Amino acid sequence: MGGYTVPGEGHASTYRHVPKYRYSAQFEGAEKELLARIEELLLRGGYVLGEEVAEFEQRLAGYLGAAHTVGVNSGTDALILTLDALGVGPGDEVVTVANSFHATAQAIARRGATPVYVDCRDDDFLMDLDRLPEALTERTRAVILVHMFGKAADVPRAARLCRDAGVALVEDCAQAIGARSHGVRVGTASAAGCWSFAPSKNLAAAGDAGAVSVRDDELAERLRLLRHFGQPHQNDHRLLGYNSRLDTLQALVLLHKLDRLDAWNARRTALAATYRERLAPLPLRFQQPGEEGEHVYHLFQVRTETEAARDGLLGHLTASGVDAVVRYPVPLPHQPALEGPAARRHDCPVAEELSRQTLCLPIRPDLDAAEIAHVCDTAAGYFTTGAP
């Protein structure tokens, strides 16, 4: 592929690849400080639940406005341990949205409970709360509300519906750290917020890492026991727990990045606005962003009119060096590992349509003007060459 002209700059660019992620950009300008702290930790020890874990938990709780945060091994474990701490188990049902990452429903199944699915909305791609009440039964123990792609769902309304039904509300916040729902940080106005800090996330560790934010003191203490073999002290096992502790090294990396999170999220928001402006003339739709602060753009979704157009656009972008990707091509009710009578209890036509018509464009905070111009020009080129 040759160079392309960046509009308004009057020269040919030599960009040949626009990657989804560029991890090194998250450390630029501060590598030496972090590496020095890592060296000190490696020589000192304290690799498991070390002092940096407690420091990160306190700092994260302050950032979110949460009473407690409990660091765990991953976002998936955050969900599993939360459901365990809430008493969810065999015979119970947990309601969630049909379009999410597999871990949302896997956590339910891992507790021996049954996932029940609600369709999503056509405009913001989040759980259709108008349809939530019909999914609640006498067996429902909890609802997992997912803030998909970085867009905050309506937490106050979901909380009211859950309270009226006598079930717990859990937030899957893996993609939405820093987002607000009705002015309040997600993950703080429910029984628990579950966080992932996997390398692709807006706040990223250098491996797997996660956390749970909670308001209730007893629930926080139960989570701390569960993550550490169910023991408050060595060889004193009060609960049947897990080995799911946030590594001290990962806590150190997260501490290094936390102060820059809001700036990175602001940059993502600005990039999303540029995409919307540049791509507006094309036959594409976008996830509704909501009010200011409600979307932190972990992913930027574009929606085509047909599946053929989506697949054609995806192929055209990737052939031109743009790391576009489909998230998620198979709705949860159709995943073989999650099949069962309850999986198809409620029709989810919007989720199925989105799975056939959406793709994600790169939206790294370090994405530069030439890269975003290449993405937009490549997308425009596809639709001007007779796309289906």
Image (cartoon, rainbow, N blue to C red):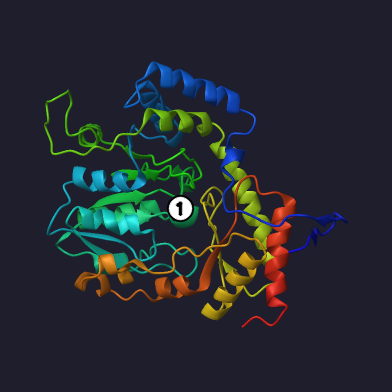
Whether residue 229 sits left or right of residue 177 in the image: it is: left
Q: Vertical placement of 214 versus 135: above or below?
A: above
Q: Position of residue 19 (x, y in %)?
A: 61, 53
Q: Position of residue 49 (x, y in %)?
A: 32, 26
Whether residue 100 sits left or right of residue 322 in the image: it is: left
Question: Could you say which quadrant of the image residue 15 lies in?
Answer: bottom right
Question: Residue most toward the right?
Answer: 10
Dot 1 crowding, Cα within 10 Å, few <14, some 14–19, many 20+: many
**Quadrant occupied by the C terminus:** bottom right
Depth check, front residue: 135 or 81: 81
Depth check, front residue: 66 or 232: 232
Depth check, front residue: 13 or 56: 13
- Residue at the image point whose x is 31% and y is 44% from the top: 78
Whether residue 369 sits left or right of residue 223 in the image: it is: right
Name the residue carrying label 1: 152
How many labels sit on residues?
Answer: 1
**Quadrant occupied by the N terminus:** bottom right
Q: Position of residue 227 (x, y in %)?
A: 24, 36
Question: Could you say which quadrant of the image residue 342 lies in?
Answer: bottom left
Q: Position of residue 170 (x, y in %)?
A: 30, 49
- Residue at the image point whose x is 19% and y is 46% from the top: 84
Disc 1 is placed on an element classified as loop
The amino acid type, in three-letter code, at marker 1 is: Ala
- Residue at the image point whose x is 29% and y is 48% from the top: 79
Depth check, front residue: 158 or 220: 220
Q: Vertical placement of 199 versus 127: above or below?
A: above
- Residue at the image point whose x is 44% and y is 42% from the top: 185
Is residue 4 visible in this depiction of the protein?
yes
Is residue 306 visible in this depiction of the protein?
no
